[in-house]
Image (spheres, grey):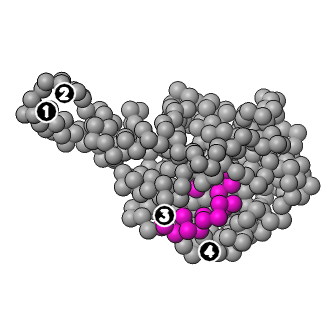
């Protein structure tokens, strides 16, 4: 995982020297006694290099591995109104002081800078983004950014039914909803809170308002909910859902155990035993999910293979944490993908596309 404080990120975005470095242009620092003419010639040489080696995508957002980072995730808060067992300890985690968190103005300024450089998709995450009081206003202002094609949110769904009509009206175009079980009592055990029916209401409100697909994120844990794989897959028969099965991953405080992880291949075999005609769908190079469809079903299922088949090498996501750090994945950090996406325990709901 790589991280850069907000101040350094702003310098990289606004500084001409950062632009030159990110493109691969050779940089020569002027010597103290170098004449103004020599400095001017050096600047001209660098500009010519850039023109001759111009990338088809923003040089600033193209890394040295050739990945074009057009997808930005912004954490609106570290707080969450659930305490999911696979995410954080029951008592929660230590939060960053409010004075050290990004203000709304800073969030919007950063979004504008990134969109100007080529970002065309922004996803709002947390913690739980829908507990932020001004989330509707943030979406409305993001919608005004020229070049931004998609505004998404990843939510636990507790507040979704209430807020979604307003969010859709101001421009929210994509929704991911976390739901790890279809059994109300088990839901309370997993998240240590009530709210199952609110989440289901949110899912149906999203369908009612025309979102297609509505993505449902399900972390699969052996001995807890792996017996519900077929029930989740069956939901896609009559509903425009993309049920996304996520391999259980380690976090500080979640007492992760390898034996609890159900691998992608095991999950896929379970589904194929019930529906042998399951079809693999094409996927984009930067996709984090392997998608499948049961013929005749309205929706689809997907698998996020963060543990068994890593996807860091093609990841195009950047993440701004609530305290103003910029994070991204390195291809060599295969098993750290989910840490990159989430930052720490309280950010688990941000972990998928």
Magenta residue span: 120-143
Name the secondary structure under disc 3: helix
Mark toward the start of the polypeptide (1 vs 4): 1
Name the secondary structure under disc 2: loop
User: Where is residue 322 drawn, in percent x and y?
Assistant: 58, 48
Cα distance between the residues tagged 3 and 4? 14 Å
Cα distance between the residues tagged 1 and 4? 54 Å
Tag on residue 142? 3
Tag on residue 39? 1
Tag on residue 166? 4
Disc 1 crowd, CA 10 A, few/some/many (<14, 14-19, 20+): some
The residue located at (57%, 60%) in the rendering is 152
Residue 292 shown in magenta: no
Cα distance between the residues tagged 2 and 1? 6 Å
Mark toward the start of the polypeptide (2 vs 1): 2
| Nearer to us in this view, 342 or 284 | 342
Cα distance between the residues tagged 3 and 1? 40 Å
Cα distance between the residues tagged 2 and 4? 54 Å
User: Where is residue 172 drawn, in percent x and y?
Assistant: 56, 67
Disc 3 crowd, CA 10 A, few/some/many (<14, 14-19, 20+): many
Mark toward the start of the polypeptide (2 vs 3): 2
User: Where is residue 122 drawn, in percent x and y?
Assistant: 51, 56
The residue pinned by badge 2 equals: 30
Badge count: 4
Cα distance between the residues tagged 2 and 3? 40 Å
Marks 2,1: beta carbons within 8 A: yes
Looking at the figure, which quarter contains the N terminus?
A: top right
The residue located at (53%, 45%) in the rendering is 324
Mark toward the start of the polypeptide (3 vs 1): 1
């Amino acid at each position: 995982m790589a991280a850069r404080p907000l101040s350094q990120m702003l310098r990289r975005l606004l500084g001409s020297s950062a632009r030159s470095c990110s493109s691969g242009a050779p940089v020569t620092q002027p010597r103290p006694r170098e004449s103004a003419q020599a400095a001017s010639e050096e600047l001209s040489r660098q500009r010519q290099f850039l023109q001759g080696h111009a990338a088809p995508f923003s040089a600033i957002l193209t890394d040295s591995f050739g990945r074009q980072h057009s997808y930005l995730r912004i954490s609106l808060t570290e707080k969450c109104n659930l305490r999911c067992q696979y995410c954080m300890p029951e008592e929660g985690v230590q939060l960053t002081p409010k004075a050290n968190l990004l203000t709304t103005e800073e969030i919007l300024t950063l979004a504008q800078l990134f969109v100007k450089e080529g970002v065309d998709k922004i996803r709002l995450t947390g913690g739980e983004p829908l507990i932020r009081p001004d989330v509707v206003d943030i979406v409305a202002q993001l919608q005004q950014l020229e070049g931004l094609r998609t505004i998404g949110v990843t939510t636990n769904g507790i507040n979704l039914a209430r807020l979604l009509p307003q969010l859709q009206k101001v421009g929210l175009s994509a929704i991911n909803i976390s739901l790890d079980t279809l059994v109300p009592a088990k839901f309370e055990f997993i998240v240590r809170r009530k709210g199952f029916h609110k989440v289901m209401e949110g899912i149906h409100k999203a369908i009612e308002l025309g979102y297609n697909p509505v993505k449902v994120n399900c972390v699969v844990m052996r001995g807890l909910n792996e017996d519900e794989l077929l029930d989740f897959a069956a939901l896609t028969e009559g509903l425009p859902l993309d049920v996304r099965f996520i391999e259980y991953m380690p976090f500080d405080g979640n007492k992760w155990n390898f034996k609890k992880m159900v691998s992608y291949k095991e999950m896929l075999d379970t589904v194929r035993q019930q529906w042998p005609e399951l079809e693999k769908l094409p996927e984009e190079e930067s996709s984090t999910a392997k998608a499948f469809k049961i013929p005749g079903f309205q929706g689809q299922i997907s698998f996020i293979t963060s543990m068994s088949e890593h996807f860091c090498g093609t990841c195009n996501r950047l993440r701004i944490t609530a305290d103003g750090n910029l994070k991204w994945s390195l291809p060599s950090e295969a098993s750290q993908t989910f840490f990159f996406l989430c930052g720490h325990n309280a950010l688990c709901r941000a972990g998928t596309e």
